[in-house]
Amino acid sequence: MEIVAKKIWFDDSRIFAEFNDGRVIGMPLVWFPRLDNATDLQRANYEFWNNGAWIHWKELDEDLSAEGFLSFRKELFVK
């Protein structure tokens, strides 16, 4: 089964995604500077690509893959 995102939402400091396998994952917005610096309206203006395999924010030039969201670990990218 391909893992795809079904729903995206935010609170004051985190981005959350619900996936088709029932998992709900949240991560700090500070890990995603474009989303962290965006307004609530800009964050809400996303679309799913490829039936939820990708989440795209056109105005912010930001893309997250469902698989990447599930496997992302900030420590892998901090030097």
Image (cartoon, helix red, strand yellow):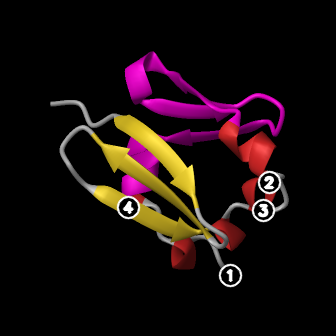
**Pointers 2 and 1 in contact (C-beta within 8 Å):** no
- Tag 1 residue: 79
Kind of element beneath mark 2: helix
Residue most extreme to the top:
50
- Tag 3 residue: 33
Q: CA distance from mark 3 to mark 1?
A: 17 Å
Q: CA distance from mark 4 to mark 1?
A: 24 Å
**Sequence-wise, which precedes: disc 3 or disc 1?**
3
Q: CA distance from mark 4 to mark 3?
A: 18 Å
Residue most extreme to the left:
1
Q: CA distance from mark 3 to mark 2?
A: 4 Å
- Tag 2 residue: 34
Image-quadrant location for residue 57: top right
Q: CA distance from mark 4 to mark 2?
A: 19 Å
**Sequence-wise, which precedes: disc 4 or disc 1?**
4
**Pointers 4 and 2 in contact (C-beta within 8 Å):** no
Question: Mark 4 or mark 1, which is nearer to you?
Answer: 4
- Tag 4 residue: 25
Kind of element beneath mark 3: helix
**Sequence-wise, which precedes: disc 4 or disc 3?**
4
Q: CA distance from mark 2 to mark 1?
A: 20 Å
The quarter of the picture where the N terminus appears is top left
**Image x and y of residue 24, in percent:** 32, 57
Horizontally, residue 32 falls left or right of residue 61, namely left
